[in-house]
Image (cartoon, rainbow, N blue to C red):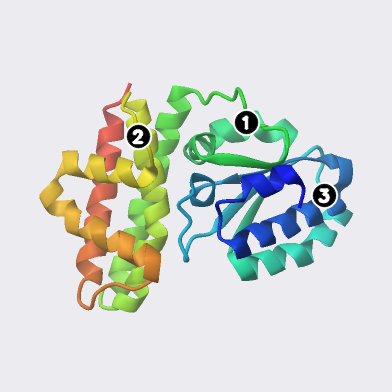
Amino acid sequence: MPTSLNAAVADLPAPVGTALGEFVEAARAAFGASLRSVVLYGSAAEGRLRPTSDVNVILVLDAFDRAGADALRGPLGAARATIRLAAMLLLTSEIGVASEAFAAKFADVLRRRRVLFGDDPFDGIAIPRTAEIARLKQVLLNLALRLRASYASSGDRDDLLALVVADAAGPLRACAATLRELEGKSTTSGREALESLAAELSPERYAAALARVSDARQTRTLPPGTGADTLFALVELAQDMRARVEALR
């Protein structure tokens, strides 16, 4: 791996760093000069990668070339299998509109990112406050709807609910961090943002549930008999967070 890439992945687990290096080199070979940047974002970029975490990257391209995409398919599939790599392919011309249209996601990218190759395509990007508020409402509403559906269909299956709870942690934490920023409050991580926000909203309702969320993120399991209570608490937390967003101007 190039020295700069080695430095960017030095604190990650060795299998993750190796797989990322191989994937970046495959992307460079596949897209050539059209590949402008490869950006790692999310928990891996934050240095909080867990065994169950996805490894999220954005490939920024001048053009989406079919031959290049075909060439990348094999390496992408291998990286998905070995390190749960999830790749977004974004055109340089789409950065501004995507940042506004998917404000909650790109606010998280702006907070937690590392450049693995090329220049930083998000340097200087500012997401309009109105776009962040609107998108945050949408994401939290969608999350509440999905969690309710999971509760209704699988509320008696701790094994299935553990997976739902684990997958809900990332969006909830990202939304909490964005909400704290919009409220003018500092935060060091999405987890801490969610915990502090939940403590303000109702510590007695959410403390135990959030502790189990962290366990589910680590192990994809929940203690027997706790799945329904945990998921229902997350439904209420998403609702309470959206109500808080509604108060923003």
Q: Position of residue 137 (x, y in %)?
A: 37, 38
Given the image, on which type of amino acid does mark 3 rest?
Arg
Q: Position of residue 13 (x, y in %)?
A: 56, 60
Q: Closest to the observer: 9 or 237?
A: 9
On the rendered structure, is 150 left or right of 230? right
Residue at 59% from the left image edge and 25% from the top image edge: 125
Query: Which quadrant holds residue 222?
Result: bottom left
| Cα gap from disc 1 to disc 3, whole angstroms | 20 Å
Looking at marks 2 and 1 on the same chain, the residue that comes earlier in the sequence is marked by 1
> Is disc 3 placed on a helix, strand or loop?
helix
Question: Against 35, is 155 above or below?
Answer: below
Residue designated by label 1: 122
Given the image, on which type of amino acid does mark 1 rest?
Phe
Q: Closest to the observer: 181 or 235?
A: 181
Q: Residues within 10 Å of mark 2 (few under 14, many from 20)?
A: some
Q: Residues within 10 Å of mark 1 (few under 14, many from 20)?
A: some
Residue designated by label 3: 28
Residue at 29% from the left image edge and 31% from the top image edge: 246
Does the image show residue 155? yes
Question: Against 63, is 229 above or below?
Answer: below
Residue designated by label 2: 187
